[in-house]
Image (cartoon, rainbow, N blue to C red):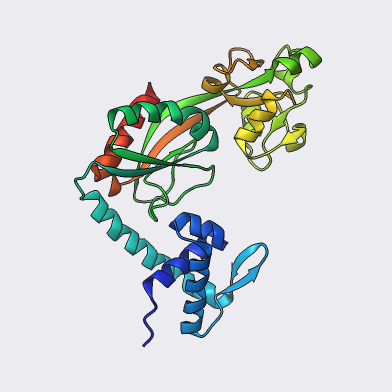
Amino acid sequence: MLTPDWTQMQSFAAVAEHGSLSAAARALGSSQPTLSRHIALLESDLGTRLFDRSRGGMALTAKGKDLVAHAGQMADAAARFAMTATGRGSDLAGTVRITASQVVATYVLPAQLKSLRDTYPEIAIEVVASDSTDNLLRREADIALRMYRPTQQDVIAQHVADVPVAAYAAHAYIAQHGQPDSLADIRNHVLIGYDRSTLLIDGFARAGFEVTRDSFALRCDDQVACWEMVVAGCGIGFGQMSVGDADPRVVRVSGDNAVATLPMWLTAHGEVRTSPRVRRVYDWLARSLRA
């Protein structure tokens, strides 16, 4: 009876989940050649092709789809084993991996981490700046900061803040195009927004104004890139008020009211939460972000 090598199964599950060797390698902290070799060996042992390879990534074959659920269960079981072992460790020194949206990782977290490291210099911090949902169970991160309520099972979560979002423009843009008189007037200006995300569209709808994707002349789902377009004077864009109000290069043009409000959630896996160093970082972030 064939007993597949666990590392090969882990690589198979990661590539199936992430859709490419490069993305899976980043998630596992491995390399593309290593994962490619694991997949080739597993296909050889099983005598079947598991992926169709293309420039766009790795797509599961019919046989791969039949096997991926079993591989995922094995990966989850191994992750829970590692979580339990990590959670029972008593050493404060070590690394904690935090994932946060690109805006939070770029403009909010650095000041928090400075204070954290001053207090706990023995704790190393890895920051993953990503707007995608990372799988805490598979140890892609120990702690996640997200602007939505997490839906993963087996995690603990705290609602730590409600973050107001407002409209901003660079001084150069206002000098050239004038400053809008109201939120309604903003729609007559050059708008910078998101490509696939409906966050701003939904925010305008709650304020009683109808906009569509085509209302935004410049679109990008990378929020840091959108903000830099605002700073460059490309148009009026949207950002967290704590970030925009502190940036002297821009002016708030939406008045005192927020265009939208984002909930900030702090999340960690329940078993890892009992790790002393993860608990210290989690509790520190909860206190400082609330403040």
Please identify the quarter of the rendering in which residue 223 is found: top right
Comparing 228 with 221, the one in front is: 228
Comparing 214 with 55, the one in front is: 55
Above/below status of 51 relative to 181: below
Figure quadrant of the N terminus = bottom left
Comparing 118 with 145, the one in front is: 118
Residue in the image at 44% along x and 58% along y: 28
Residue in the image at 64% along x and 21% along y: 167
Above/below status of 43 relative to 130: below
Residue in the image at 38% along x and 85% along y: 2
91 horizontally vs 114: left or right: left
Q: How many marks?
A: 0
Comparing 246 with 118, the one in front is: 118
Figure quadrant of the C terminus = top left
Tell me residue 107's x, y (percent). 51, 28
79 horizontally vs 71: left or right: left
Tell me residue 151's x, y (percent). 44, 46
196 horizontally vs 48: left or right: right
Please identify the quarter of the rendering in which residue 221 is found: top right
Residue in the image at 66% along x and 62% along y: 56
